[in-house]
Image (cartoon, coloured by chain):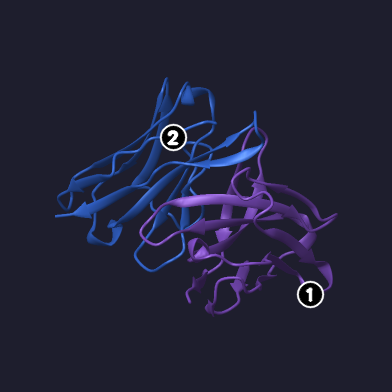
Chain colours: A blue, B purple
Amino acid sequence: SYVLTQPPSVSVAPGKTARITCGGNNIGSNSVHWYQQKPGQAPVLVIYYGTDRPSGIPERFSGSNSGNTATLTISRVEAGDEADYYCQVWDTTSASYVFGTGTKVTVL
Amino acid sequence: EVQLVQSGAEVKKPGESLKISCKVSGYSFTTYSIGWVRQMPGKGLEWMGIIDPGDSDTRYSPSFQGQVTISADKSVSTAYVQWSSLKASDTAMYYCARHVYGSSSNWFDSWGQGTLVTVSS
């Protein structure tokens, strides 16, 4: 089955840029979606189709994808961005959702 | 406004049965599939399966095939997941989410608030 690997944690100072990676075999050929999950809350979609933002998601959130790595970038990080972030692809081979292992973003 | 409202927390004993629900509003229930996602304590997201409420066509993750049953009732715009015999390892938060079919991929664009299931003797 397809595996998506994320770093367990990323720390960033307020106002700086956080980059969260999602590794998978030739992931650049897939569309990657990203979710934010704050403590005690349900996940929220922040990026779909790799680069698109749903209504209400700040422009500070952006995505990229190439080769074996997809990246979620959070610019001008705020304290409210502290959360777990998950990448996700749709595995067409098995017709199933695959979630990444998740990354905890800590704002210093 | 799209809303997915899940049933309340449950505390059950091993071996008991359970059915939790996800009632949707703000859109036509049969237009989008509904998925279920498990999150065990302190762990990540695991996809369980999806159901097309229009025809009740259901697809399960291999990890959950035979362990749960996903269903839907169009008359009340509600999706369900049920267990016939709970185990302690079923203790988790369960989320429903609206499944979007894209041209080349699929994702969940709206989520329920979650239902906490605790299985303990």
At x 29%, y 51%, the residue is A104
Q: Residue A8, image x and y in percent?
A: 28, 44
Picture layout, residue A108 above or below residue B73: above
Q: In the image, what residue type sits under mark 2?
A: Leu
Chain letter for mark 2, please.
Answer: A
Disc 1 element: helix
**Residue B2, image quadrant:** bottom right
Q: Residue A13, image x and y in percent?
A: 14, 50
At x 42%, y 52%, the residue is B44
Compute the Cα span from label 2 to label 1: 37 Å
- Name the side, left or right, on which A17 lies relative to A22: left
Disc 2 element: loop
Q: Which residue is mark 2?
A: A4
- Mark 2 packing: few (<14 Cα in 10 Å), some, or many (20+)? many
Q: Residue B17, image x and y in percent?
A: 66, 72
At x 52%, y 71%, the residue is B117
In the picture, the quarter occupied by the C terminus of chain A is bottom left
In the picture, the quarter occupied by the N terminus of chain A is top right
In front of the other: label 2 or label 1? 2
Note whether residue B66 is visible: yes
**Which one is nearer the viewer's eye here, B24 or B46?**
B46
Marks 2/1 in contact by CB < 8 Å: the verdict is no
Chain letter for mark 1, please.
Answer: B
Note whether residue B1 is visible: no
At x 61%, y 69%, the residue is B3
Q: Which mark is residue B76?
A: 1
Picture layout, residue A28 above or below residue B66: above
- Mark 1 packing: few (<14 Cα in 10 Å), some, or many (20+)? few
Q: In the image, what residue type sits under mark 1?
A: Val
**Residue B75, image quadrant:** bottom right
Q: Residue B31, image x and y in percent?
A: 77, 56
